[in-house]
Amino acid sequence: MTKADLDLEGFFPLTVAAALRRTAAVASDIEAIVAPDGRLTWGALAGEVGRVSAGLAAQGIRRGDHVGLCLGNSVRWMTIFLALGSLGAVTVPINTRFVAAEMAYALRQSRVRTLITCDRLFKIDFIAMLREICPALDRRLPDETMPDLARVIVIGADVPRGAVGWAAVAATAGGADIEDADAGDPLLIQYTSGTTSFPKGVVLSHRSMLANAYFSGLRMGLRPADRFHSARPFFHVAGTTLSILSVLQHAATLISMDRFEAGEALRLMEAEHCTHFSGNDTMALMLLNHPDRAQRKLGLRGAWLAASPTIVRRVIDELGARECVVGYGLSEASPNVAQSCFWEPEAIRASATMRPQPGVSVRIRRADGSDAAAGESGEVLVRGWNVMRGYFDKPKETAEALDADGWLATGDLGSLDGAGRLTFLGRAKEIIRVGGENVSPADVENVLHRHPAIKQAAVVGVPEQRLVEVPAAFVILNDGHSADTETILAWAKGEMAGFKVPRHVWIVDSFETIGMTASSKIQKKQLAAHARGLLGL
């Protein structure tokens, strides 16, 4: 394919409000979501979205406002997200594993005007975190440290003086007078680590996310009243686009969890009669290898996986998901670029090769900039309706990722066969895939360099049985300073989200003998090989 020329208008709803109206009208009594905080049918959910929209509008939230959302997977998360989309506001999902500095950066960089947060989740005290980054929370907002943050709405009992409790939102009577956003309006700002030290906010539209959700669900085989288990975090596009919006577009039921645990996931799949599930390679392996699996009577028909052929084959054979499909994507593409289809022969689907989504063009670029031949590997380039509007308030980074003709440079490696099917070969940007999280080595290095004893740090990914890959760090200490690996690791746990913390740290005198170019650049490939050798892998 060389041209994305599919006209999406009229195929299916392209705004959140339109999609919700349609699904509630034709599938009112079908369950929309089952989550730890309850369950709702599509009819009941539409009513609740209307009430929440009215409450949020009464709080001053308007079309185009950026609204941070910091909650675990829940009926409430889905309700608020759909309500914000119906109002034309832009959701900024906050990763619930962020530490204070990471949350502060996301809120400040995206210019969030309203933050909706729970007071606590598991052992995380978000109010204490907010007090640290925004002292005016106990007086009156905004704060000079967060000049754009005009209001904080708290779900829970711990409501600071400068915040508003959720009861004030829930108590608003009547429905909101909802005017559809335009399909091209932004719906989400998704933070992604990328390859720089600072995360970038990917701006995605109603059209790109709802079309992506429709085609992904169609190719997975979702039908009305199907029951789709997905524990993918709602603060990721795999949770918003490929879970929430996919069931919205296909009138199916989403079964979710506030955190993934394989034994509980298997129990839910059995108890809720799930027909499909979504997962990455780590999740699939945890399900396959769990001791309870043999006892569970599963009725799976299909699955959406980001996994290797070996894992796909096991899911088909051992979990019975015979219509299992494989997808490839990235946040900048809303996220799905290519996917296999449930109606294709099993052998093709098990090979993990994929068709680009309808109306999406894919090219493979050699290092010299020319197009690769069929079967030849190179960088994956994408163009079409699924491509982001850009990185929020980062024109330089946007220009580096998107060329004048609309081609997105993914930084990923792949190949196209003679039939135009894509094979994903790996992340060329040195991203470390820790379970379902993408970790930028530069991001981790940037934090390690704040340690007073560390002169230089280099981070690479090393294989790990459960998470597939984990960060490992080599550090050079400053002259006159001493530190051991345990001290560095303990410090790092307080400075970054847990999934970013290196699992291994080695103190070295220099990188010269491990891998350094003549221009004094660390050769990460050699460094990673050295790390694997040290670990006996």
Image (cartoon, helix red, strand yellow):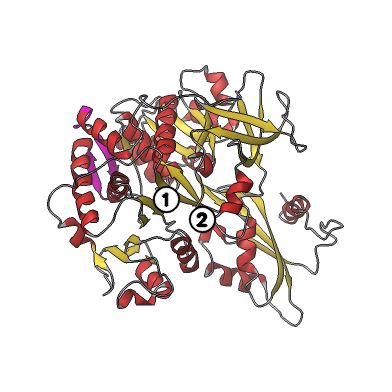
The residue positioned 61% from the left and 25% from the top of the image is 2
- Where residue 461 appears, as percent x and y from the top left, is 66, 52
Disc 2 is placed on an element classified as loop
Q: Is residue 216 visible?
A: yes
Query: Which image quarter: residue 14?
Result: top left
Q: Is residue 28 above or below residue 497?
A: above
Q: Amino acid at mark 1?
A: Phe
Q: Is residue 535 above or below residue 424?
A: below
Q: Is residue 295 magenta?
A: no
The quadrant of the image that shows the N terminus is top right
Label 1, label 2: how many angstroms apart (C-alpha)?
20 Å
Q: Which residues are magenta?
A: 26-41
Disc nearer the start of the sequence (1/2): 1
| Residue that mark 1 sits on | 235
- Where residue 233 appears, as percent x and y from the top left, is 42, 48
The residue positioned 35% from the left and 76% from the top of the image is 136
Disc 1 is placed on an element classified as loop
Relative to 130, 347 lies left or right = right
Q: Is residue 37 magenta?
A: yes
Q: Furthest-bottom residue in view?
A: 480
Nearer to me, 484 or 297? 484
Query: Which image quarter: residue 4?
Result: top right
| Residue that mark 2 sits on | 393
- Where residue 41 appears, as percent x and y from the top left, is 21, 37
CB within 8 Å, label 1 to label 2: no
Relative to 200, 21 lies left or right = left
Q: Furthest-front residue in view?
A: 404
Relative to 105, 476 lies left or right = right
The residue positioned 53% from the left and 57% from the top of the image is 499
